[in-house]
Image (spheres, rainbow, N blue to C red):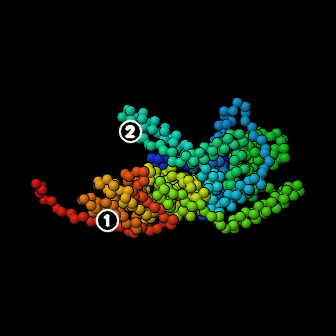
Amino acid sequence: MLKSLRVIISALILILITFYFLDFAGILSHQFHVLAHIQFIPALLFVNIVAIVCIIGITLLFGRVYCSVVCPMGIFQDVVSKISKLVSRKKKRYAYRKNNPVLRWSVVGVAIITFCLGYTFILGLIDPYSAYGRMLVHLFKPVYLLGNNLLATVFNHFGNYTFYRIEIVMQSLYAFIIGIFTLGIVGFLAWKSGRLYCNTICPVGTVLGYVGKFALFKIRIKTDACNHCGLCAKECKASCIDSKAGTVDYSRCVNCFNCIDSCNREGLSFTVAGKKMNRKNEKQKSINEQKRQFLLSGLATAIAIPATWAQGKAKTVNGGRRTVPISPPGAVGAEHLLHHCTSCHLCIAKCPSNVLKPAWMEYGFGGIMQPVMSFEKGFCNFDCTVCSNICPNGALKPLSVEEKHLTQVGRVVFDETMCVVHREGTNCGACSEHCPTQAVKMVPYKDGLTIPFVDPDMCVGCGGCEFICPTRPYRAIHVEGNKIQQQAKAFTVEQTDEKEITDFGF
């Protein structure tokens, strides 16, 4: 019953999270972003006290059930290992593997130190939720869109327009390569060794594994029923059961309950911890406590290290014209984004205008893969607040539509010498037509022409003017990012005189 319950809940969560990332048509409500908010690293960065307390509390009660039921990367590994067992010619068996706490805590220590120094890129690489999100956005979503376009072609041929074609765009070559690399490493380890990634690299698994040692309910081996046959160890994908010694390493156990089902003598049970312990175990416990104290002291010291490492200068974009990158609405600024974003790319996946893409060196080395605004494929919808309201890390602060209307992510810059009105002596005005705040207006020029006039204080940086500008290779008008997002000057809708027409005018 425990295993069946775990499989049903974990499958439901994996399907919902996966489809929410892939869903371009808005079939799932944006309220499903709560599934991202209950992930451990995002909850820590967002300071989501409720989620953190719930995760720690459940782990103290039942062990690492989070890793088996809530974490999408953990569930993904279970799927891969299950497929591996089904297609393997020989019956796949796992074996007990000694724990490597030095490696596990070293990974956690490196992630914390680099995060404190402003290199969130490292934490984002190994955070299981963010890594899974990038795999979905850059690897699986193009395949999903390709399937949709094939269905659209077939259905449209028969006059059914239930499906419609969507442009498939590779948003970032290096994000695609990192996604391939992540899928290869995690998939290979899961295929060969089950939960090896969780118990060697994943920082969430290490931290919750430490907490899980003190869980109230644990998988227990009944000494009077166990004959040390090893069946439970062969089914343990966490490789944490030493059947010869009759022990379980609870720092690695993810409570998948496969071992309980495998035992034909009912030698295992999920019960409250017993109080009896022999001298050997007492001695080992004392040694482990000393190790834990040493590791925790080291981590506390690492957390206290100030962020003194100099940040790399932002690389210019837009053909060398933009010197400050444009961070998404609600990001406060590049510095805030740097210390909160783990590059899960949920905002990139859900942006309806495709103006968000993974950064390269725009924010410096520490901000690689974090979202940056680009107006090559579109511009930011004036009334859209999707990215700021679904961010699980607090990297993008929630904005109402009214707040979004006055959030200035950048300021408009106009180069008259590049404008087609000046260069070719022809009317244009496309930038003014696409400006929602009247930051760009057309004013009289020469020979009866009109030319853009900009008011940067009224600009919100939506990029409508830059996207539509016809000049190439550089735009005559573009948006320069704000290092700290400002409040734009409010605009008023111009009133036009309405005349009552009582008769035809001719």
Q: Quadrant of the C terminus?
A: bottom left
Q: Does residue 277 sit above or below 151 in this rendering?
A: below
Q: Quadrant of the N terminus?
A: top right
Q: Which residue is mark 2?
A: 161
Q: Is residue 439 left or right of 102 when viewed as pictured?
A: left
Query: Relative to the observer, which residue lies in front, 230 or 480?
Result: 480
Query: On the image, numbered disc 1 is attached to which residue?
Result: 493
Residue drawn at 37 percent across, 51 percent down: 470
Q: Please, what is the three-letter code of the amino acid marked with disc 1?
A: Val
Q: Earlier in the sequence, mark 1 or mark 2?
A: 2
Whether residue 325 is visible, yes or no, is yes
Q: Position of residue 325 (x, y in %)?
A: 50, 59
Question: Residue at image x 56%, y 43%?
Answer: 139
Name which residue lies at 33% across and 55% down. 423
Kindly identify the amino acid type of the residue bearing the numbered disc 2: Tyr
The residue carrying pointer 1 sits among few (fewer than 14), some (14 to 19) or many (20 or more) residues within 10 Å by Cα, namely few
Can you give x and y, in whole percent of width and height, for residue 289 in the image? 81, 61
Could you tell me how far apart the alpha carbons at marks 1 and 2 are, in whole angstroms? Answer: 38 Å
- Element type where label 1 sits in the image: loop
Seen as rendered, the residue at the extreme left is: 506
Image marks 1 and 2: residues in contact by CB distance under 8 Å: no
Task: Report the residue at 42% width, 35% height from top.
Answer: 153
Q: Nearer the viewer, residue 383 or 116?
A: 116
Disc 2 crowd, CA 10 A, few/some/many (<14, 14-19, 20+): some
* 325 on left or right of 67: left
Marks 1, 2: nearer the viewer: 1
Q: Residue 150: image x %, image y %?
A: 46, 35
Rendered position, 302 above or below 471: below
